[in-house]
Amino acid sequence: MPTIVTHAFIPVVVGKTVTDKKMPLRFWILGIFCSVLADADVISFNLGIEYGAFFGHRGFFHSLCFAFILSTVVAILAFRKMGIFSKRWCLIWSFFFLINASHGVLDMFTDGGLGIALFSPFDTTRYFFPWRPLRVSPIGIGRLFSVSANAALISEIIWIWLPLTAILVIRDRYKKVRRKTNSQPNTGNK
């Protein structure tokens, strides 16, 4: 799995990319929550659940089905005043779905583990992408600052943080140019 820091970075970048509106603090907190929640399944090790089991690490909680359920619950509970199934509510739901689904997809780019049960419960096969440039992050708080955790973070900076930061910078530059172009008076001949 990528580090929790990288999973938490995704909602910030996606949120800043898709909207210019000031979003409430709960939007950002819930976005981060949705992006990291899948890794709560590591408690399965303490419960005696095997890694490759349905509820094992990288199992059902890393699936698109779980992303659908979680985003629906979060959007209904936290944003119901928008009107459930209104256009704005559906956009909020889509954001939370994308953020939670990104967790399993990012994990599919790592070089360790058993793979991701992305289509669980319909297909419990564990999948990886053929190209896996991300070093897998060690599991456990005690190993958070280990050599292998540092190597994982460096690979994430190269393959995730830098490209996403570049997207944000390009987007901001584009917006500034557009604003400047739109604010200039039209001097064409009539």
Image: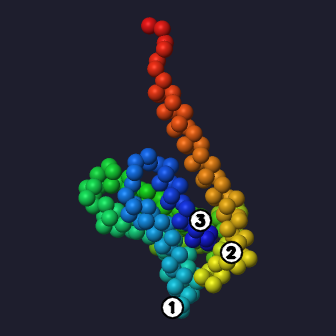
Residue 41 position, x and y percent, is 51, 80
Q: In the image, 30: left or right of 9?
A: left
Q: Which color scheme did the rendering employ for the protein? A: rainbow
Structural crowding at the residue carrying mark 3, measured as other residues with C-alpha within 10 Å and reported as few (<14), some (14–19) or many (≥20): some
The secondary element bearing badge 1 is classed as loop
Q: Residue at x 42, y 66 (%)?
A: 30
The secondary element bearing badge 2 is classed as helix
C-alpha distance separating marks 3 and 2: 12 Å
Residue 117 position, x and y percent, is 54, 72
Residue kind at label 3, given as amino acid type: Thr
Q: Residue at x 51, y 54 (%)?
A: 14
Quadrant housing the C terminus: top left
Residue kind at label 1, given as amino acid type: Leu
20 or 77: nearer the viewer: 20
Residue 56 position, x and y percent, is 53, 82
4 or 87: nearer the viewer: 4
58 or 187: nearer the viewer: 187
* Circle 3 residue: 6
Residue 9 visible from this viewpoint: yes
Q: Residue at x 57, y 71 (%)?
A: 4
* Circle 1 residue: 47
The secondary element bearing badge 3 is classed as helix
Image: 19 above or below 75: above
Image: 116 above or below 172: below
Image: 179 above or below 159: above
Structural crowding at the residue carrying mark 1, measured as other residues with C-alpha within 10 Å and reported as few (<14), some (14–19) or many (≥20): few
* Circle 2 residue: 149
**Lower sequence index among marks 3 and 2:** 3
